[in-house]
Amino acid sequence: MKGSTVTLVLSVLSREPMHGYSMTKEMERLSQGVLTLKEGTLYPILHSLERDGLIVARWESTPGGRDRKVYHLTDEGRGELRRRAQEWEQFRTAVDAVVQGGVWAYAGA
Amino acid sequence: MRAHEFIDKVTAYITDPAQANEVRRELEQHIHEATAEVEARGIDRETAELVAVARMGDPAKVAMGLAEAHHQHLPWRHYLSPLPVLALMASVGVHGDEVLAWRLFWTVGLIVCLFPRWVTAERLVRTLALDVRMKLHWLGQPPQSDSMLPGLATGSTIAFLICLLSWTPASEPVILLLMAMAVGGTVLAWWRNWNGSFLLHGAYAAIAFPLTFLAMFFLVNENGFDLRMLFMVSTGFALAALTAGYFGSLLQRRRTQPRRT
């Protein structure tokens, strides 16, 4: 997961604006419990993304009366996500090609 | 650890009170929700809070990450943090007729540095302590250890130019060493991809002063010990490193701006 956390965070936010806590839950749900986003890792990433203009944060009130800081993906953030998704696709294809080649060679031996 | 202790530890490292307050609100909200979730499983509130806080991880690591993100918003003032030390040393070390002028100069520097409310002495010490801790932390991680190279390269380049333009002969071994550091650092920085951070530039600037002070001590000692010159040159080096750190961070920020697709 290391190195792709930013891509994962941007991907989760591309579905809908969310606050930090719901992002960790959504990540677990989407990955069926395989990926867990540590809260201590999440907030520095969110603040860096906000600094770089890829996301914006707004305080919004909940029906229960509590305020939540909700993060929204910006247009620049969407562009960055597209770029990262392409890179990930290339990387995944390359790894698949190498690993599957190894599996077939092993099966044929 | 209780929620308020965790939040206090994290926010203590953020120098801007407005940003610290923002982080405090956000973490409080997060821990509140995480606590409620654990509590819903039939666990008492206090234990649930402890579990929620434990899931946040090491407060120092969270603080390091947040401080790095937030220091990007503190431009030139952050680099003035070593100024009080320089001021103190200069006013102690300088003698002669110009002592008043020197003290006046550094007093103004101190006022400029400390006037903003958020740069209290306590926060200054905490930030500098965090700088050192972050630097040690990152130095232990090879993939990120090249982060300091941009600062090293730019600082050394400017220091070299200062030496070249001043009275110090360019053939001195220390100057050659600085030049090698500048060239080598620059090449390495670009080769390994510019990956500096604002805080690391600051950390470099903070260590530049004692290093250059020592270097100049040996240089100046060859022609007789001149304390005033020693302070002037080493202060010049430190200020050069601070300036380099600032411009280095600007360059780094421009380079890491999201690319439009």
Image (cartoon, rainbow, N blue to C red):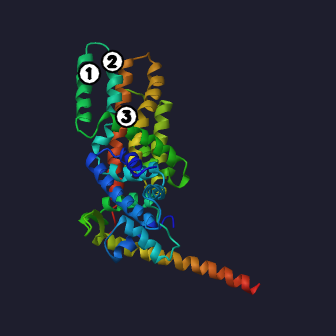
- Out of B7 and B206, give the one closest to the viewer: B7
Percent x, y for residue A92?
Answer: 52, 77
In the rendered structure, which amino acid carries the disc numbered 1?
Arg
The residue at 26%/34% (across/down) is B114
Q: Which image quadrant is residue B195 in? A: bottom left
Q: Which residue in the protein does label 1 denote? A: B103
The residue at 43%/16% (across/down) is B225
Q: Which residue in the protein does label 3 denote? A: B238
Q: Which residue is at the far right?
A: A109
Q: Which residue in the protein does label 2 denote? A: B94
Instruction: Classify residue B196 as left or right of residue B140.
Output: left
Q: Quadrant of the C terminus of chain B?
A: bottom left
Question: Looking at the image, do the residues carrying marks 3 and 1 touch, with CB atoms under 8 Å apart?
Answer: no
Question: Looking at the image, do the residues carrying marks 1 and 2 touch, with CB atoms under 8 Å apart?
Answer: yes
Q: Secondary structure at mark 2?
A: loop
The residue at 28%/72% (across/down) is A75
For discs 1 and 2, the disc positioned in front in the rendered view: 1
In the rendered structure, which amino acid carries the disc numbered 2?
Val
Q: Earlier in the sequence, mark 3 or mark 2?
A: 2
Percent x, y for residue B164?
Answer: 38, 34
For label 1, count other residues whose C-alpha is less than 10 Å away and answer few (under 14), some (14-19) or many (20+).
Answer: some
